[in-house]
Each structure stands twice: as structure tokens, then as C-alpha cells.
Amino acid sequence: MPPQSPPPTNASNLYFFYGHRKPSQNRPTVHGGLFSNRQTLNPSKKHHQLDNKSPDFDFRKWDPDSAQSLSIPPTRTPPEKFFSVAQTLSPIARYIVDTFRKHKNCWSPAVIEDLNKLRRVTPKLVAEVLKVNSDPRISSKFFHWAGKQKGYRHDFSSYNALAYCLNRTNQFRAADQVPELMSMQGKPPTEKQFEILIRMHSDANRGLRVYYVYEKMKKFGVKPRVFLYNRIMDALMKTGHLDLAMSVYDDFRGDELVEESVTFMILAKGLCKGGQIDQVLELLNRMRKKLCKPDVFAYTAMVRVLVMEGNLDGCLRVWEEMGKDRVEPDAMAYKTLVLGLCKGKRVEKGYGLFKEMKQKGCLIDRAIYGSLIEAFVADGKVGSACDLLKDLVDSGYRADLAIYNSLIEGLCNLNQVDKASKLFQVTVQEGLEPEFVTVNPILVSYAELKRMDDFCNLLLQMQNLGFHIFDDLSRFFLFVVTKDEKLTMPLEVFEYLKVRGYCSVPIYNILMEALHKIRKVDKALSLFNELKDSKFEPDSSTYSHAITCFSEIGDIQEACTCYSKIKEMSLVPSVSAYYSLVKGLCKIGGIDPAMMLIRDCLANVTSGPMEFKYTLAIIHVCKSNDAERVIEVLNEMIQQGCPPDDIIYSAIIYGMCKHGTLEEARKVLSNMRERKLLTESDLVIYDDKLVDHMKEKTADLVLSGLKFFGLEKKLKAKGCKFLPT
């Protein structure tokens, strides 16, 4: 064979077979002959990747809660999106999509003019454009425009692409009308078109829409295959429409179709979810007669569904049915039922299945041991739980921290704190890194038994293990104040720990709040004064608790001082502190500052008290000087379960004195008295407050007028003693 001549060196002859041409964004790089490796070039993307090389990822330094991990990945710009889409399109389809993008996805004469430049439009081209377009309006316009072109006729691919496009943009109701459109245009829909719609709705859990499409299939005379029947029944069962699913199954049998194993399992799982066990057993009998006996996987699936629904009686009936079929349960079936029984507080039945597993030599994993141990502890049978722990260790497993936590809590509940402490030492020796949940029962037991030396020794050990002592002590006191209603034990522990330096502001706050709840306000205020005299600085929570206590004993001056302290720290009091202070001010007649506090509260908290919201509504309605409209607001408030109190009546006084008259305010108060929402004595008190507040407002107006006209100095010069200095 003669040697081949080298390729010509003339640049004009360099084409596909000889040499390589210069690559571009739209033309791939081609080297050598006819069969060559092709590589698409994207210069901007390539340079971007080179410029942003990231170091190797170190999993040990990964923090899932960091801002970088939680940040949303950057979205691509519209040109980048268009480039990624254009890579998969043919040149003509790319031209059409680019036309839509250029005219901002708006159907206009300019778009039609660009489309009319095309010589020929094919259904394949229409389907290609609809698959990538995301605007349903322009997609529908383009589909209609293509249908009017000379010699063009839509085929199944273009109709399917239109249905996909409409569903992709959540226009699924319009997508359901595609079969009617096909029928009108002389293209009767087939089963495939209905299958597409059913699959779309089932993936989106729209069970009723699936049934709607199924009914439409019957109108068009299209009979589903077994596969599609299964899909319809599965979608209806998953969305809880059992009656509709069974009616579809009746149609299935009426069409004389033969059930598959999938058909029976879809119906069985759906009926299990609905708790209809009798129908499940009937279905299993039909399955045995027509097909075969259910296998272990089918029974396990039914048991899992029943366990998730909490129907343990149904689980046991299905389990008995499995025994009648002589189907041997595997480890997964046992595990599913045992975990469900333990969760449903039927630990004895679960333990019986556990022993059955051991007799059969089934593999028992640690989850079964852990579930049984926790269930035994919850049932008060800690001895049985400890025996299971020994069995777990003998089987070659290592107990996890959850198992130890459960056993420690169970031992402490039985006043066996020394055994619980030894078990805690075991967790430390095994390097399980115990948590606060592990040591909290031991701390509570030591405190209840007044073994404070052991309590402090455990705190030292916790500190050596890396616990955050003061945070954990706050959680300890938060737990014991809810457990001990009289707070005798928490206060004794607090006094003991305070001497040894185990004290913090959050602990003071927890005890103050607990004392206020049991009406020991004096003791709570003594803790507040003690905290102020100590080396600690009270925080906003401390002052908030102090506000509620001072307001309750009627010392509004001190409560206002605490409020000022919070504002000096640029913080916001608690909602309960706002409410207590406002109510206290209203009782002593400080209506104006109370209304200012209400506005301040609603401006700084996400959800204020209902009384505060209705206060603003009442003040707004008072601008009309109409008692009937104010009474309508009060009626609405009462219907919401919020009866009028001092704050609401003060709001009526404030609003009517500022915007209305005394007569209209008295009409509202008299209406409340007639409806027995206000006592006679309270009516007299509020009437006096109304008169006093109106006098204050009138005096303020007089003083403002004197200042405005410059008469204040003249009156003072003449010896007037009524003006403020």
C-alpha cells in the first residue's frame, strides 16, 4: 500500500477531514479524521471553574449549621440558563426559543413575524420547543399558531409535550383538557395521553384529579390496562380515597381483567391504612384463590402500614393470618412488629416475639434490644430491662447512649441512684460522651435525698468531662421547678450551691418566675434584691419578672423603674411584663402612659395580648363618637373569649376623652352594666376616672392655648398660682 500523502498545508483546505478548526461556543472541537473525540467548548464556564478552585473538603471540619452550609447555592443568570437549554436544542428550535426570550415571553406581532420566517414547522419541532419553555401562555399561543400553518397537523408527541408544559407550570387543570382538544382536532386520545395525566397527578398526590381523569377515560371509551388500573388505585389509596379506589377495583373486575400481585398489595396496604382489617382478610382470601398466597414481604408491608397507623390489633390479626398461611416471618418482619408493640406499650407481647426470634436463630439487631429496654423501663420493669442489657452485651453488641439513659432514668425512679451512678460510670469508661439527659435523673435523685456532697462531686466530674455546668444547672432547675410545686427542694439546692459558687443569672430568673407562679411574690422580690446586691448584673428577663411581681403588689413606681432599666439596655420586656405593667397603670389611673406602653409593646413583639389589639381598635372607633360602634367591638371581643377588663375600660375612657364626649362614654359603660359585665361599684369608679381624665385633658388644652397665645407669662406675673412652674 503506497504511503499516504500528508494533508495539504493550505489553510483554506483545513476542514472536517483534515486538521482541526478553531473551536467556538457553538461549534465543537474536532481533531483528525472522521471518527474523532468531540468536546463542547464553554469558555466562560471553563475559566470560571479554573478561577474558583476550592481546596479539598475536610469532613471533620464540616459544620452543618454554619452560614456557608445553610446558604442557598447561587442561581444562574438568564443568559446562562438559556445557554444550558440551547445546548440540547436543534438550531431551529433554538431560534424559536431565542425569539421568545428576546421578546420577553410576550406573544406579539414581532414574535409572529419572526416565526413566519420559518419555512416549515413539524410536530417534532413543536414538541422540542414546548419541552423547554416554561411560560404556559406563550406555549399555548405557539401551539395554536403551529396548528394553523399550511400542511401542519399535530401528532401525539406535540399534544403530550403541551400537557407536560402545562403541568410543569402548575396549570394541571388546563392539561386535563388536552384530550378534549385532541378530539376536537380529529385526533382521538389514546390510553397513553390519559396515562401521562394520571402519572402527573399521582406524583403530585392529587387523588381526586386522578379519579377525574379516570372518569374522562370512560367517557372517551378508553379502557385502562392492568398497569394503569394499578396506578389509579395506588394514587387513590395513598391520598385516602378508599371508597373511590374500591369502586375502581369493581370496574377492574367488571372488565374481566386478571389481578397481579401488585394489584392485591396496593389494595391491601390502602385498606390497612384505613383500618378496614376485615376487608383486608377478604382480599387476601381472594388473592389465594386467584393468584397465590402472600409472601413474607407482602405481610411485612401490611404490618408496617398498620404500625405506622398505630393499629396494633390489626397488626396482630395480620400476623395470625401469616401463621395460617405457614409463612415464616424474617428478621425484618419481627423487627417491624416488635418495635410497633413496644411503642404501643405492649412490651410483653413484643418480648414474646423476641424470645421466638431467639429460638429460631433470627438475627436480632440493637434497635430491637433498645426498644424493648425503653419499653420495660417505661412500664416500671427495670429488672427485665437490665437483663436485656446483659443479653445485649453477651450477644456481642455495644449498648448505645440512649439505652443507658433509659436505664439510668428507670433506676433513679426506683430510688436506686447508686446503681444508676455506676451505670453512668460505665458510659464514661466506654467513651459514649454522656449528655445532660444522662446525668439529670442522678442529680434530681441526689437533690431529693439531700446528698449534696455527691451532687457536687458529680458536678465536678461533669466539668471534667466537658459539660457546660451553668447551662446544665439552669436546665436542672427548670426541670425541678416543674416537678416540685412547692419549690422546697429547688430552693434548698439553690442555697447550697450558691455558697459554693454554682450560681448564675438564668438560675435566679427561673426561680423568680416559678415563685411568681405559685404566688410567692415576696420571696421572688427578695431574690431580685439579692441578685442586685451580688456581683451579677440582672438581665432583661430578671427585670421582666420583677415588673410582674411589683405590679402584682401594687408598687407601680418600682415596676416603671425596672421597665426603664430594660430600655436603657436597648432590650424589650416580656409580653407578660408589658401586660402586668399596663394593667397596674390602668388601676391607678395612669391611662396615658398605659396607652403608650401598649403601642410600644405591639411595635416590638410579634404577637401581643388580645386586649392590646382591641385597645387600639376601640381608640380608633372612638373617633366616630358613636357608642354603638364601640359596643360592636366589645361584642366581637367577648365572642373571641376575651371579656373586658381594666385595660379595655381605660381604652374607652382614653378614646372618648380624646375624640368623643362623656355622654357617649357613659352609654358604653351603662351598656356593660346592663349586661352584668360591670358591677355597680366598678361603674362608679370608672365614671370617676372618666371625669378626672376629661379634666386632665381639658386642663392640658387650656395650658396649650395659653402657651400658644403667650399668656402664660402674663398670668404668672400677675400672681396666678394655678399654672405649673
Image (cartoon, rainbow, N blue to C red):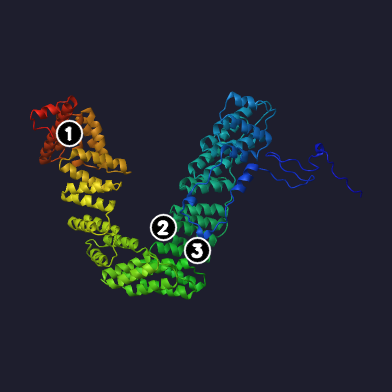
Work out how far the residue at label 3 is from the one at label 1, CA to CA, in angstroms: 70 Å
Q: Earlier in the sequence, mark 3 or mark 1?
A: 3
Q: Nearer the viewer, mark 2 or mark 1?
A: 1
Q: Position of residue 591 (x, y in %)?
A: 18, 39
Quick check: can you spot residue 189?
no
| Image quadrant containing the C terminus | top left
Pointer 2 residue: 310
- Element marked by disc 2: loop
Q: Position of residue 662 (x, y in %)?
A: 14, 30
Q: Mark 2: few, some, or many residues within 10 Å (few <14, many ≥20)?
A: some
Q: Earlier in the sequence, mark 2 or mark 3?
A: 2
Residue nearest the observer in this picture, 100 or 211: 100
Work out how far the residue at label 2 is from the one at label 1, CA to CA, in angstroms: 55 Å
Q: What's the amino acid at mark 3?
A: Ala
Pointer 1 residue: 668
Badge count: 3
Give the vertical position of 562 relative to 406 (above or below): above
Pointer 3 residue: 333
Give the vertical position of 469 relative to 233 (above or below): below
Q: Position of residue 373 (x, y in %)?
A: 41, 68
Q: What's the amino acid at mark 2?
A: Gly
- Element marked by disc 3: helix
- Element marked by disc 1: helix
